[in-house]
Amino acid sequence: MRTAGTHDGRIGAESGRTAPRTRSGRWAAVVLALLLACPALSQAAGLLVPTGADNSLAIANQKVVVHINNGIAVTTVDQTFRNHSNVQLEAMYRFPVPARASVSNFSMWINGKEVVGEVLEREKAREIYRQVTSTRRDPGLLEQVNYKWFEMRVFPVPANGEQRIQIAYYQPADYDAGNLVYTYPLEVEGVANAALEGDFSVLVDVQSNIPMKRVYSPSHEKDLLAKEAAPGRYRAGLEVAKGRIDRDFVLVCELQREETGVNLVTSRRDGGDGYFMLQITPSEKLDRVLEPANYLFVLDVSGSMRELGKLALARAAADQMLTNLRPEDTFNVISFNIAPEGMAKSPMHATDENKAKARRYMAELKAAGGTDLVPALELAAEQQDPQLRNAIVLLSDGQATGSEDLTGYLQILHRRQANSTVFSFGIGNEINRPLLSALADKTGGYADFVSGQDDLGRKVAALQMKIQSPVMRDLTIDWGDQKVSDVLPAPLPNIYRGQRIVLYGRYSRTSASTLSIGANVDGRAVTFRTDATWPKQDVSNPEIERMWAQNACETLGRRINAGEGGDRERKQIVDLATKFSIVTPYTAFLVLEDEDAYRRFNIERLNADRVEAERLAQQQRYAWSGEVVGGPAVATGNSTPASPASPSSPSNSQDLGGGGVEWVFVGAFTGLLALGWPRRRWSRS
């Protein structure tokens, strides 16, 4: 072993070329089905694959512009391919799927003019792409291959010429324990040549209603320059001539205090339902250490963990958590590849001697073999202690055999004891987020993912803090006079120490309402109330609509993966994705050469209209004088927070530090827990 929905948006092979082989071949069959040739390979931030000539296609430059506004990030990637051959080429470019990202645009520059793409059902987009390339015209295709990769195909890259493209995507930046963290994924396995012929640059504009202490990059500390442009606003950037793009760019925004509160962002056009995003962040007072716990460290030592130092990162994470265990805690280390092996037959107390034994055991582990996670989870389930809180800490990239079908994993979790929880800690970029997230979600746990370029110590400390501290369970929201629908995620998740949950949904009424949010903390019922305004029209945050639709599609996709959905859910995904212009496993972005081409194929310009509206809103929100790539600045949604809360019943309420929101404790109040929202009014920029 050790060597080893519907149309209104509501939820309800090609042949002739061979594909490149990967280290495991897990997605080689997919690539083969997609006709992706690989006579020459240049790997960086994905795979750049030219067809028709060897080593003649290169990435001339890559410019990245990022706007982060109160935790919402919009990334615009502007990239130029250069063809050094005497024949026109087709370029295929693979890049990692960023966490919780929604691709919002794919554009190409044709005859010096930007042409915005449209989202179609995937097979229809492929067929049109084939037709157009056969006539030597200028199409582009962007699709999601699987949970790890997006894939872009561009034709033609002219002989001895260049082709410029642009991709934009939205995502919530990670928030944990007072830090906003943004990651631009570049690090992939098997990098051969990650150098650009031109420049690699990143420009970041960060705005926060909470003042920031500093903005820094653990990945590019020497290259990044960050300056405070105004209170609550930082500008940061780096530029490297002939830069290498073989490691992630990570930016950390350290807030002056840990954010606490409720933040409401809305979008509504005339004549339809509105959309909203609601952020809920508990205070730093959820930091009391609870009773002893039983830690079961499930450590992946399969062959995929050998790449990019993933096993070393997992080992270091487990080592740090071991250090912070108390003598009354118990633990065991279960390593696994094709079969599991426990360091001990049963969990041991966390004495210094046993911790040292665990470190010696982990130091001998080697990454090799396949990945069978099911027996490892079964062994961990057998070693739970019914008298303690049980934390199964899964340290893995999740690239397990048969992981596309989650039913087997979920059956194990259904047999688990009621007081066990899975905490997934995904290592690297090529990770199975759907699997790792499902394992955590189904047990009321927490999933986090770490880049090899991030601050591992900070990430591990935040994860262990969640295991040791109280958690808000059984979250409920009474929306008052407002009528909401399709609120996601559903059911509402637990909220852990330092975490912020983000909810998306639709609303129909246009009036103020009082939200009442309740939860169970340490066996005590708590509630707070806060006022919210729901506008009749709000065109300042159109991105929220896509972000809701992205979450709706992901929810339907999880049902399919769990064996709870089929053709009906796939059709709902296609309907939502085409309506809101989102790339999913069943849809793709298609760029045609001009407006006549779109009319010829009867393609409605839904995304072009969305991009125009979003860019207009972004320009109006931002007075940003820096360089803009690919047209108007692509920025983030500006938040419209809920107003300070109204008092709860005076007979059993208490202002618990900071005012603004009052929590009502039902039952005995011990003074050990204080959840307060500072009084503040947030306004638009």
Image (cartoon, helix red, strand yellow):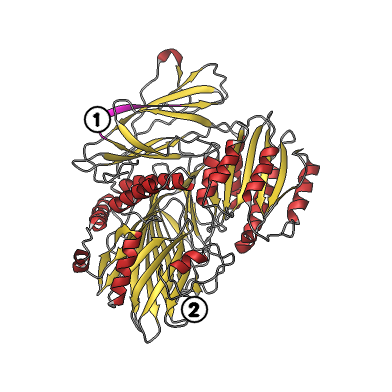
Residue 203 image position (x, y, % from top left)? 40, 61
Within-10-Å neighbours for mark 2: few <14, some 14–19, many 20+: some
Asked if one can make out residue 422 in the rendered structure from this viewpoint, the answer is no
Q: Is residue 611 left or right of residue 498?
A: left
| Residue at the spot of label 2 | 40
Write down the quadrant of residue 139 in the picture. Answer: bottom left
Is residue 516 rendered magenta in the image? yes
Q: Looking at the image, which is closer to me, 410 or 228?
A: 410
**Quadrant showing the C terminus:** top left
In the rendered structure, which disc, 1 or 2, sits on the residue that comes first in sequence? 2
Mark 1: which amino acid?
Answer: Ser
| Residue at the spot of label 1 | 511
Residue 639's tag is: none
**Quadrant showing the N terminus:** bottom right
Asked if one can make out residue 211 in the rendered structure from this viewpoint, the answer is yes
* Residue interval drawn in magenta: 508-518
Write down the quadrant of residue 105 in the picture. Answer: bottom left
